[in-house]
Amino acid sequence: MTDVEAEIQEIVDRETRAWDTRDLDTLIAIFHPDMVWPWPPHAQAHDPMEWVLEWGRYDEGRWRQGWQGLFDNHELIHNIRTTHKIEVSAEGDGAFAVVDIDTLWRDRDGNDFRWCGRTCKVYTKVGDGWKMISQTGVLDYGSGSA
C-alpha cells in the first residue's frame, strides 16, 4: 500500500469509527464543503434515475441534525466495513475507495434499518489532507458485495 492509499484507508477507518461511536464531530470533519450525497432508495436501484438527494449540498447544521436524529432514535447493532480497492489519481489529488458495508440500526420499536452493499467513496486533496466529496449510496452488486 502506498502512503496515499494508507491516507485514504485511514479516512475510511476514521469514518467507520465515527459511526461506531456516534461521534458527530469526527464524522462531519470528513466531508468536503461541496459534498453532495446521492442515495438510492434501495440496494438494487442501480439506475441513478431512481436516486434522490435527501439533504442536498453539504450543510453542516442540516447534516449534523440529520445524523443526530439517527443516533438519538436508533441503536447501532453492527457496522462491518471492508475496503476492496483504493484508486489514486496519477496527480495524487483525487482518490476513491470501494467499500462494502453492512450497517444495521434498530429503532426504539425494534424495527431494523440496514445499509448493506457496496459504496464508492470519492475523496479530493485539500491542503495537506483529504475530504470526502461524494459517495454513492449503498448498492447490491450480487455476490461481490456485502
Image: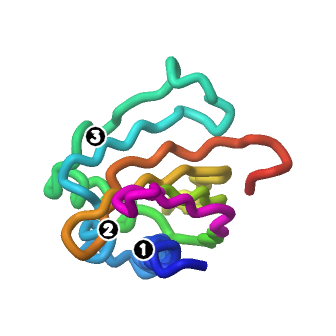
Q: Which residue is mark 3?
A: 55
The residue closer to the viewer here, 19 or 88, is 88
Camera-near label (1 vs 3) is 1
Q: Amino acid at mark 1?
A: Ile
Q: Nearer the viewer, mark 1 or mark 2?
A: 2
Which residue type does callout 2 highlight? Trp
The disc at residue 130 is 2
Mark before the other along the chain sequence, 1 or 2: 1
Neighbours of disc 3 within 10 Å: few (<14), some (14-19), many (20+): some
What SS does tag 1 mark?
Answer: helix
Q: Are marks 1 and 2 in contact (CB under 8 Å)?
A: yes
Is residue 128 found inside the magenta-colored segment of the image?
Answer: no
Q: Which residues are magenta?
A: 82-95
Residues at marks 1 and 3, CA–CA distance in whole angstroms: 22 Å
**Residue at the front extreme of this rendering:** 90
Q: Where is the N terminus found, in terms of image quarters?
A: bottom right
The residue at which mark 1 appears reads as: 11
Badge 2 crowding class, 10 Å Cα cut-off, few under 14, some 14 to 19, many 20 or more, is many
Ranked by sequence position, the earlier of labels 3 and 2 is 3
Disc number lying in front (3 or 2): 2
Identify which residue is drawn at 50% across, 18% down.
49
Instruction: In the rendered structure, find residue 119 and report the number of the disc placed on it.
Output: none
Q: Position of residue 114 (x, y in %)?
A: 61, 53
Check disc 3 and give the amino acid type: Trp
**Lateral position of residue 18 relative to residue 145, left or right:** left
Q: Which residue is depicted at the point 41% across and 29% down?
A: 52
Mark 1 touches mark 3? (CB < 8 Å): no
Evaluate whether residue 101 shows in this view.
no
Q: Secondary structure at mark 2?
A: strand
Rendered location of residue 119, percent (x, y)? 57, 51
- Element under label 3? loop
Q: Position of residue 11 (x, y in %)?
A: 42, 74
